[in-house]
């Protein structure tokens, strides 16, 4: 899998996406008294016995790293904005000097409260162009497969309520652009349009709603533009207090991806919904879908606030269809949700009629999400399945963030500082990619964090499969990884950790197996000054031209904030 690293802008034009976002902000956002400035500096010295990641004739090197950074942020009643700039200067003992820079910006402002919102992000970054890049983290290797990538996204949205909230409308437009300076990676652009209207939260008898979405994107390696388009409507009327009849319909289709068959084509159905109690309901429908007759019977049952079950069976696209889902939250420490469905409109598109035997859509999809926390352990399981086009593949991951606070694990909340006496034990399962392909991604991951008293154990296991759905030759790749680590806080300021990881990857005729061991010691000297010592050994076996790679490295780091 590709790994994001620090960026390397070469001219001032690359900064334009960042300043473009800043220029869109209202003048009130730029009030001098509203801004908060931060600054920091990192100094490190590293020794590596294979600075070029070569299979033979390995060259050792001492590398001095100087990394200053500054940041500006503003948070107010109408939103927030942040600007971050940093540079990294790598000084090699051979006399080589590598200077890289990092520039990013983000904003979320609400010029008209409750009505208009504007979200934007811009980034200049780097990505490894090779399928099997360096096995060690960092950007100090003198390899040629690191390339510059740039991205910018802007999402304006409008929310309006009319006639005393009896009619609600929502409109959003997403604009995305990504590019790189390598022919291996794609340059892509896309836009996503969402239109929706619905009845208010307390209708008397009549309910209605309509939705339209269109996701259009193109990339430098694709011969056609990819379009995902869907529209739907529904009208309901309560004939009795607990009986409602309705009419619904719409269409789903895709263009530009030969092996993607859409989500059932045109559909139209009429039905009745009966809810004899607040915790039980039945829905029956008859109609047409994809040019064939369809029918279904659905039920949902919620015997308590802790359990919610739903099931649907029927016929669609001349084949049996079903959908099962459930949610169970027995307490604040445990939550479980799972689903399985076949031959239904959903967020996942059907693929390959040769494998599913259906005329339009019929591939089974599954989802799982489990969290369980006890005093000494946290268990997390995830399954993700989605179709992703080239413009959506910049930065995706499945996070499992927790803090180890003494003998207890606590979930990490966005924007929350690290609690006193706690150690971050976040595990990230990345599947970052920029490809000239629309892909079907299947990723499952599991983590277990267990407290041994003062110390803690962390385990993670994940597998990602990508099936290429584009108009080119197609294909697939797969990566499996396993990681384990042990951490011990000596005090509130000092901690150490040991870890190991293993991964294997396959793509077309390429294979790669890698493993690594590491040790680290960290000490917080003052609230604004931290130090660390790290040692790592990594090995990678691959059948590509680079050959097998080994590296051992030791580094000492000093970080400060002002």
Image (cartoon, rainbow, N blue to C red):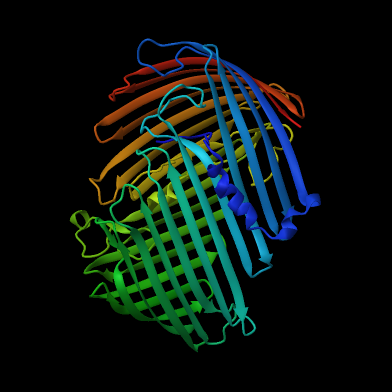
Q: Is residue 201 left or right of residue 310?
A: right
The x, y position of residue 344, in whole percent, is 33, 65
Q: Is residue 549 left or right of residue 124?
A: left
Of residues 220 and 43, the one drawn nearer to the viewer in this rendering:
220
- Residue in the picture at 66% in, 59% down: 109
Of residues 290 and 157, the one drawn nearer to the viewer in this rendering:
157
In the displayed structure, 411 sits above or below 454; it is below
- Name the residue at the bottom extreme: 239
The x, y position of residue 433, in whole percent, is 41, 42
- Residue in the picture at 60% in, 75% down: 160
The x, y position of residue 477, in whole percent, is 31, 39
Q: Quadrant of residue 411?
A: top right
Location of the C terminus by quadrant is top right
**Residue 410 in sight here:** no
Label count reads 0
Of residues 292 and 511, the one drawn nearer to the viewer in this rendering:
511
In the displayed structure, 338 sits above or below 234; it is above
- Name the residue at the right extreme: 33
In the displayed structure, 388 sits above or below 528; it is below
Location of the N terminus by quadrant is top left
The x, y position of residue 383, in whole percent, is 42, 47
Q: Is residue 243 left or right of residue 253?
A: right
């Amino acid at each position: 899998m590709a790994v994001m690293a620090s960026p390397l802008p070469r001219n001032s034009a690359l900064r334009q996406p960042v300043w473009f976002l800043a220029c869109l902000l209202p003048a009130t956002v730029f009030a001098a008294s509203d801004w908060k400035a931060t600054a920091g500096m990192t100094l490190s010295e590293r020794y590596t016995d294979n600075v070029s990641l070569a299979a033979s004739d390995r060259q050792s090197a001492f590398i001095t790293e100087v990394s200053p950074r500054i940041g500006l942020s503003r948070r107010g009643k109408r939103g927030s904005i942040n600007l971050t700039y940093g540079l990294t200067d790598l000084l090699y003992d051979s006399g080589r000097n590598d200077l890289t820079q990092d520039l990013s910006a983000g904003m979320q402002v609400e010029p008209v409260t409750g009505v208009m919102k504007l979200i934007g992000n811009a980034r200049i970054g780097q990505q490894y162009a090779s399928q099997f890049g360096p096995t060690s983290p960092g950007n100090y290797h003198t390899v040629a497969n690191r390339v510059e990538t740039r991205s910018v996204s802007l999402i304006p949205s409008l929310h309006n309520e009319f006639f005393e909230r009896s009619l609600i409308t929502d409109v959003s437009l997403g604009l995305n652009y990504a590019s790189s300076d390598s022919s291996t990676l794609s340059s892509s652009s896309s836009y996503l349009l969402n239109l929706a209207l619905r009845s208010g939260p307390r209708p008397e008898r009549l309910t209605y709603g309509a939705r339209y979405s269109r996701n259009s994107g193109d990339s430098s390696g694709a011969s056609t533009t990819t379009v995902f388009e869907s529209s739907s409507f529904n009208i309901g009327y309560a004939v009795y207090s607990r009986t409602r009849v309705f009419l619904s319909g719409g269409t789903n289709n895709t263009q530009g991806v030969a092996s993607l068959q859409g989500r059932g084509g045109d559909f139209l159905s009429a039905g009745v919904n009966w809810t004899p109690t607040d915790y039980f309901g039945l829905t029956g429908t008859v109609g047409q879908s994809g040019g064939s007759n369809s029918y279904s019977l659905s039920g949902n049952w919620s015997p308590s606030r802790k359990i919610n079950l739903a099931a649907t069976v029927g016929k669609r696209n001349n084949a049996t269809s079903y959908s099962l889902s459930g949610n169970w939250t027995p307490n604040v420490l445990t939550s479980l949700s799972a689903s399985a469905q076949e031959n239904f409109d959903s967020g996942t598109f059907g693929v390959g009629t040769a494998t599913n035997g259906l005329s339009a859509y019929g591939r089974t999809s599954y989802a799982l999400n489990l969290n369980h926390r006890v005093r000494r352990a946290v268990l997390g399981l995830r399954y993700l399945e989605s179709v992703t086009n080239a413009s959506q593949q910049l930065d995706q991951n499945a996070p499992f963030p927790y803090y180890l606070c003494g003998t207890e694990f606590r979930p990490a909340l966005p924007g929350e500082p690290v609690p006193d006496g706690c150690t971050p034990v976040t595990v990230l399962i990345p599947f970052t990619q920029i490809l000239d392909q629309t892909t079907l991604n299947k990723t499952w991951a599991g983590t277990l964090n267990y407290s041994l008293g003062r110390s803690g154990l962390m385990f993670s296991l994940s597998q990602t499969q990508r099936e290429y759905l584009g108009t080119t030759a197609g294909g697939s790749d797969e990566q499996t990884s396993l990681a384990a680590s042990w951490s011990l806080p000596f005090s509130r300021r000092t901690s150490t950790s040991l870890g190991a990881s293993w991964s294997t990857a396959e793509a077309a005729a390429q294979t790669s197996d890698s493993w690594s061991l590491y040790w680290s010691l960290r000490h917080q000297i003052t609230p604004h000054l931290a130090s660390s010592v790290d040692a790592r050994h990594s090995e990678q076996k691959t059948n590509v031209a680079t050959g097998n790679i080994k590296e051992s490295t030791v580094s000492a780091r000093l970080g400060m904030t002002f």
